[in-house]
Amino acid sequence: MGVSVFTFLMSLIWSSIFILISVLCQRTMALKHGVNFILAILAVGIVRLLLPVEVPSIFVVRSTVVMPFFQRFFTTPILEIHGLSINRFYMFLAIWIMGSAVYLLLIAWTIFRQGREVRRMKTEDYLRASKLAEEIELTPKRKYQILISPEVKTPMLFGYFSPVILLPPLTLTDDDLRYVLLHEWNHFVHGHLWIKLLFNIFCALLWWNPLVYMAKNDLDYILEVSCDRHVVSELSAEERIKYVEATTNVMKQLAASVTRQDIPSIGFVAAVPEKIVQRCELILFPPKEMSKRIKMCAVVSLAFLTVLSYAFVFQTAYSVPSVENSQTDSIRIDPENAYLQQTPDGKFILYIDGEPFDTLEQKDIERPPFSDVPVHK
């Protein structure tokens, strides 16, 4: 297995394709069937990005226009620092890594800042809610806190390991409060905080790709709908109506103050009225579960695309140079089997499979295939 400019470009293309598929599926499949398959698609996209390898049996598609353009664009040196040639590929890679590092630091800082703000909030134990939680018997059994604070804008879950349910001072019946607690607890049980964190890390890895922000755009709403599905899955029709009433009751009381939550928290209410209506419809009239046959087709399709992404690679089509006294009719020259050794007089010796093959001038190594092989000084 090897890595080259071509396999790197293919990894970018295929990871973007997987992200695009997840975006197209979000507003249909995710709302009706949950986020697991969407996450699986994105996971494949991440793996495809991080493993830009060329498998031994790969089919090479020779390109005479597109790939030579990209190859020249990325590999042509644009400046030299202390004898080291720098091309656009290395500059792009450096900017990419620095941008991702800054993005990851911002995520870490936001989590730290939000945790500090929660600890500094004027909170008090919500004894009534805690008593209801004991009656509900929240599972799995984990240490948790239920706090009330006027500084909280909407019911939310905070904490990756030790969950804290934060509630604003609302006028709620026991039934309304019970459903709010169930909703927030299901966010914790199904790892929605971790999903949001992973999405943000994914955005950090591909911060320059607008498709990742399209995938992230509706994440909060999709997680809310997914949480609704989990809560109401075992409720009767009458209890579903009460759950909808609880949702709309909380929405009415917070209509003037609901804001989008930051990275490390999950809120209860979507602020857009159209989305509230859609959530209520999905709760009262839940779509049928995806059949096993459709699930199997989706899994097989994803596996097929994954294998296909490694089945071929586009590469520059090289014309074989005519060489006098050569014992072979064709010679393969690429970064895997060849390199250039610079001589003191400014010329370059071409080595193929470890053996000196030819001596080239500076002008010769500025065009393919010689411009693609590494230079040893």
Image: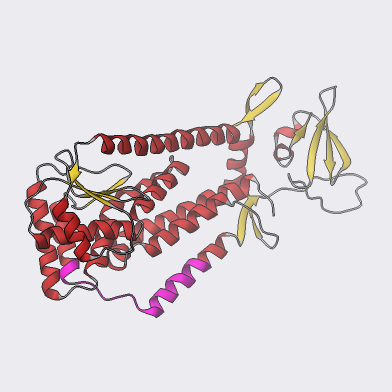
Name the colour scheme: secondary structure
Check the image and report above or below for 59 versus 46: below
Q: Position of residue 267 (x, y in %)?
A: 23, 50
Residue closest to the far top = 82
Vertical order, 325 against 120 (above or below): below
Is residue 180 at least partly visible in the picture?
no
Rendered location of residue 263, percent (x, y): 32, 43
Direction from residue 13 to residue 344 in the image, left or right: right
Decide whether residue 241 is among the magenta residues.
Answer: no
Residue at image location 78% in from the left, 50% down from the top? 332
The answer to which of 131 and 56 lies nearer the viewer is: 131
Give coordinates of residue 137: x percent, y percent: 25, 65
> Would you say 323 lies left or right of 209 here?
right
Quadrant for the N terminus in the image: bottom right
Residue 296: in magenta span: yes
Q: On the rendered image, what quadrant is the C terminus found in? A: top right
Residue at the image point whose x is 20% and y is 58% from the top: 181
Return the x and y of residue 50 as percentages of the image width and height.
Answer: 56, 50
**Can residue 344 be seen here?**
yes
Which corner quadrant of the image does residue 281 belong to? bottom left
Q: Magenta segment, which residues?
A: 283-304
- State the image quarter where residue 241 is shown: bottom left
Q: Is 356 situated left or right of 15 in this image? A: right
